[in-house]
């Protein structure tokens, strides 16, 4: 597993047009700040209506704790900025991410973003099919995202989601995760634990 301590000294991917390379920690905090601004008006769907940025910080925290590379952590912070700002007055684009964080990070975010022009059920099917062919960084972001979402399904499920809908969601997350595993053993273990908890909890409710 990569050494998490290395992140405090190792420069991240060299950013287009910016030299010398920015220290990884500075890039990570810049991404957190960027995400907080993009998601300033966004809330989670759950009863707690948490600020959306809580979700992306949790995803990044999961990635960092599992020793994921800095580019994956940065992409974890930014993973919903394009998809979830499409209805905002000034949507965030992949080109914006490319300009601010470089092509590698923008590419990872592109891999984990749904095409909002497609119907929801089609998008969900595509996530299952695309996971196995994704880059290693995108697979780790996907797994961390599903771990965070499964936790939220327990702590603050979306309003109006009945038992059957939550069960369907957990099963779908498991199918996406199946294609994203095999890169980072710590994430694989954490996903399996979180998935088992979610299934057990739903079985107890039934
Ligand atoms: Zn997410």
Image (spheres, grey):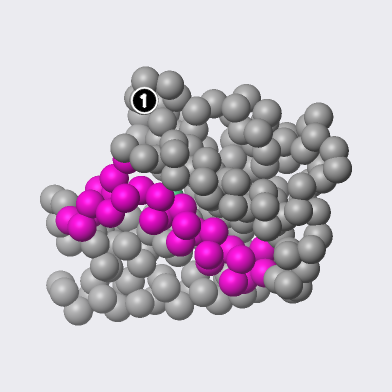
* Residue 64: x %, y % from top left: 61, 66
Circle count = 1
Q: Is residue 80 left or right of 204 when viewed as pictured?
A: right
How far from the left and from the top, in percent, is residue 121? 35, 37
Check residue 199 for magenta coloring.
Answer: no
Residue depicted at x 30% and y 78%: 200
Secondary structure under badge 1? loop
Q: Residue at x 36, y 29 (%)?
A: 119
What residue would you read off at disc 1?
88
Please give the name of the residue rendered at 81% of the width and 29% of the height, measured from the top-left corner: 17
The answer to whether residue 93 is visible is: yes
Q: Nearer the viewer, residue 13 or 36?
A: 36
Quarter in which the N terminus is drawn = bottom right
| 137 left or right of 131 in image | right
Q: In what quadrant of the picture does the C terminus appear?
A: bottom left
Front-most of 85 and 193? 85
Magenta region: 42-68
The 10 Å Cα crowd at callout 1, few under 14, some 14 to 19, many 20 or more, is few
């Amino acid at each position: 597993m990569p050494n998490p301590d290395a992140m405090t000294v190792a420069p991240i991917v060299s950013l287009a047009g910016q030299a010398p390379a920015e220290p990884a920690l500075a890039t990570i905090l810049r991404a957190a700040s960027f995400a907080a601004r993009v998601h300033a008006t966004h809330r989670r769907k759950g009863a707690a209506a948490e600020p959306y940025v809580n979700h992306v910080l949790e995803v990044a925290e999961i990635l960092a704790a599992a020793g994921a590379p800095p580019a994956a952590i940065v992409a974890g912070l930014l993973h919903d900025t394009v998809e979830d700002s499409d209805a905002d007055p000034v949507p965030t684009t992949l080109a914006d991410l490319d300009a601010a964080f470089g092509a590698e990070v923008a590419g990872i975010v592109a891999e984990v973003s749904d095409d909002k022009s497609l119907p929801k059920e089609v998008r969900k099917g595509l996530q299952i099919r695309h996971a196995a062919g994704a880059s290693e960084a995108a697979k780790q972001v996907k797994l961390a995202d599903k771990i965070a979402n499964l936790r939220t399904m327990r702590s603050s499920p979306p309003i109006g989601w009945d038992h059957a809908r939550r069960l369907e969601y957990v099963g779908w997350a498991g199918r996406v995760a199946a294609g994203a595993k095999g890169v980072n053993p710590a994430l694989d273990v954490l996903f399996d634990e979180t998935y088992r908890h979610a299934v057990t909890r739903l079985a107890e409710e039934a």
